[in-house]
Each structure stands twice: as C-alpha cells, then as structure tokens.
Image (cartoon, helix red, strand yellow):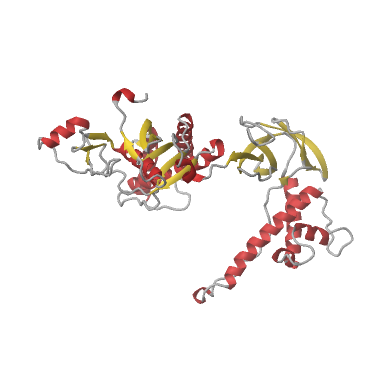
Amino acid sequence: MLKKKKGFNLIQKSLRCKLLRQGFDLTSTKARYNEAVSFYFALVNTFPEHVLSDDCELSGWYAYEALSSKGSQYEFRIDIPAVLRRSAIRKAIGAWCSWNSNYQRWLARPQKHKHHKPPVQPRRFNFSPSYDAGMWKKDTGSSIMLKILVKGQWKWIKFHYQAPNYQHDDTGLNGWHKASSSIVTKGDNAFITFTLQKYVSATGGCKKLLANDSVRILGVDTDLENNIAILSVLEIAANDEVVEVTRHFIKQTNHTKLRKRDLGLIAIRMRKTGIVKKGFCNQRWEKISNRENEAGRAIAREIVEFAMYWNCSVISFEHLKNLKPCKGKYSKRSNQKRAYWLKSKVFNEVSRIAFQDYGILTTRVNPRDTSRLDPWGQELARLDNYSGFLAINLIKEGKLENSYQKGANFVVNINTSYSAHSGLNAARNIGLKAILRHRTNAIFVLRKASDKVI
C-alpha cells in the first residue's frame, strides 16, 4: 500500500480479473472466513468499549485478537491463517459499527416514529475474504499463488487470470501500484479484485490553474437528442483574451434509436397485458441499463481523450440536477428520463476518468442563459432552419421573425452578425463562466478565418 506524499494526491481504483482454475472451489474458503467474522462480531458485541472508546489500554482490532488468544476465556478455535483472521476482525468491527449507528438513530427517532422496530443484528455474513500480504505470492501479472482451503487444509494453489493492460509502476509515480486484493465468488465463477494506487501531482484547484496564462479549458454542453455533447476548447492569453482553439461534436443517434425501440416494445407489451408485476420485461430493462452504462463510459472516455489531446487542464460542465422529464406517453417520458440520467452519468465518469488517468480537474457552472446569450452577454435569436448571414439578412428584411425557438439548432445576433450552432455557443459560454469565476476581465475573441486551427 502506498502512503500519502506531500505535493501529490493518492488515488485508487479497482482491477477485476476472473480466476481460471478447474478442480478447486473457493466457497469453502469463503465459508470459513465468514465463520470467523461471525465469531468476532459476537465478541465485539460483548465488549464494544474497545471500538467506542480509545481510553482503554487496548483498542481496535488487536484488542479482540488479544481477547481471543490461546488459553483465554474466549479462545478462537477456528483454523484460519493469522492474516485472514485479522481481516475477519476488521470486517466484524465494520459490520458491528454499521448496526450500532442504525440502532442509535432508532433510539433517537422522533415521537411519530416510535412504532418502528429496532434494527436487528445480522444473523449470517456473506463477505468476500480480503487477501492481504501473506495470503498471496508470486504475482506475475497473469498468474498468482493463493492460500485457500482444500479438503480442510490450507494450501498454496496457483491460479491464472487475465488482466487488461495498464501501466505498472511499484513507486506509483509513473503508473499504477498493485496493492491488496479480495476474492469474490459468484455462483461457479471466482474473481480476484486488486486495488490499484497512483500518485497524481497536486494542482492547487481550478482557481490556481485558471489564474495562469496559456491555460486551456474544455467547455462541454450536453444535449438530449442528436449531439450528446458539444465540446469547445478555450485558451486564455496573457492579455485576458479567450480564444477558441478547436471544437468537437459527439453524436448519440444510434444509441437513442436503440433505446427508443426497446422502450417502445416495453410500452406495447404493457398496453397489451394491462398488468405489470415485478420482473416484467426484465431482460429488456437489463439490456437498456447495460447499454446506458456502456454509452456513458464510452462518451466520457471520448471527452477525456479529447481534453488530453488538446492539453486542457480543466473540463467545465453545466450543473443540471433539477431537470425532470415532461409528462406524456410512457415510452417518451421514460426515454427523456434516461437521457437526463445519461447526462449525469457522463459527468460522473468524466470526473473520475480525467483525474485518475491524467490529473485533469472537472467543474460545473450555473446553466442560466448559456443558450440565450452570446459570449459577450447579448440576446440571441434562435432558429431551426436558417443559419449564419442568411438568417441575419432575412430578419433585417422582415421575412423572418427575430425570436427564440427552444431546441432550435442555430443562434444569430443581427447587431454583431455573430452566428453559431446553438450547442457550440452554449459550450463556449460554459467554458467562459468557469474562467470568469477567477478572471473577471476575460473577454472572448473570435479568431479570423485565416487564424483558425484545423
């Protein structure tokens, strides 16, 4: 395990790999581990002072190890390695503290909730054994030796596993350091989950980053229909001028089609049957859920890689937590509900991936007027079928109404001849809002046609 280091943030993630070994069952190891957890849970419940107070001579897991030592009144008689035994003690302490906190809240419940029953202590446990140092050895990246229970005896058994490629470094400065692992059994399959740790240089936060010159920020506007994300890279010059370096559109047409198709099929079945019970169309719901998760990860990865390619230090999103789907037919409302969910999924995944892999920070800004105003704060006309100078000329000639059509694709300003895609204009404003938090004199400047970066 890596330790905290000054000037660095310690981050971690999990690496899950399937164990490949025929003829060996890990369920007996798991059962023996939970048997030890059950014993120590009862011991913690008998002597809770070692957890609740630090004033006693012994506190924490080593107090319960001493209480259950050989020859004591509560002697531990289960055959289990010392490393796994200490892991079981810590699991038992965590389980008891969880129950105790719920019980204390029950005691302090208001008068109107006095009829609620108290939380009961768990009668059985289903924890996966944690394999700390001493329970595994000879990890080559494709195989590992594990100490497991085989016919009542603890033996070293070699297992093979397939792990995705990742940059490995024992120091944690230039790659991931592999720490402790845990074994998870699901049916006939067994998985080993490693903890990966890495040092990321401390940046000082968005305030310190955006105070520098020549720093780049990525503004991201999320949409519900064609383009799930519109990206705009903004660069801050020394004279507080902000210029757009490049832009990118991420479409979701195929994903939306598949989601609408499955939701429509579910709606048809609901109308035919008229009775909806638990488990109704569970396979289609699972398919939709899996597709949403995969789309969220794929879109987030594309945004992060784009930010890394253009050397962005901060990624700015709009804060959209209060969105609610509009009323309507079931499939339409459900589609919009999942589109809103996908927005938050993309933000959460971008925030995680960007900081874990590249140390890029993520922030959110107020979405107010990001689509209604141009980067200089002037009102815009929003139109669907006309763009650029064509729309400006038609408005001036009185052939086209100078109005704001919600959801239209283009925005124009007849006074300054500014025109842009509505999503791109919003992405620029989102990036500018993040900059203006810390540089109040920043001004957006349009590049000349000859100066545009391709």
User: In the rendering, at what x and y percent does residue 88 appear?
Assistant: 74, 53
User: In the rendering, at what x and y percent does residue 299 appear?
Assistant: 45, 35
Q: Between 45 and 264, which is closer to the camera in this rendering?
A: 45
In the rendered view, tell whether residue 201 sits above or below residue 68. above
- Residue closest to the far front: 239
Please indicate whether residue 415 sits to the left or right of residue 362 in the image: left
Please indicate whether residue 436 sits to the left or right of residue 94 in the image: left
In the rendered view, tell whether residue 126 sits above or below residue 191. below
- Residue closest to the far left: 398
Q: Is residue 351 visible?
A: yes
Quarter the C terminus occupies: top left
Residue at left offset 74%, top offset 63%: 44
Please indicate whether residue 133 sits to the left or right of residue 209 in the image: right
Numbered marks: total = 0
User: In the rendering, at what x and y percent does residue 220 appear?
Assistant: 39, 39
Q: Is residue 265 visible?
A: no
Residue at left offset 41%, top offset 43%: 317
Please indicate whether residue 75 sits to the left or right of residue 87 in the image: right
Q: Between 123 and 306, which is closer to the camera in this rendering?
A: 306
User: In the rendering, at what x and y percent does residue 153 appear?
Assistant: 83, 44
Quarter the N terminus occupies: top right
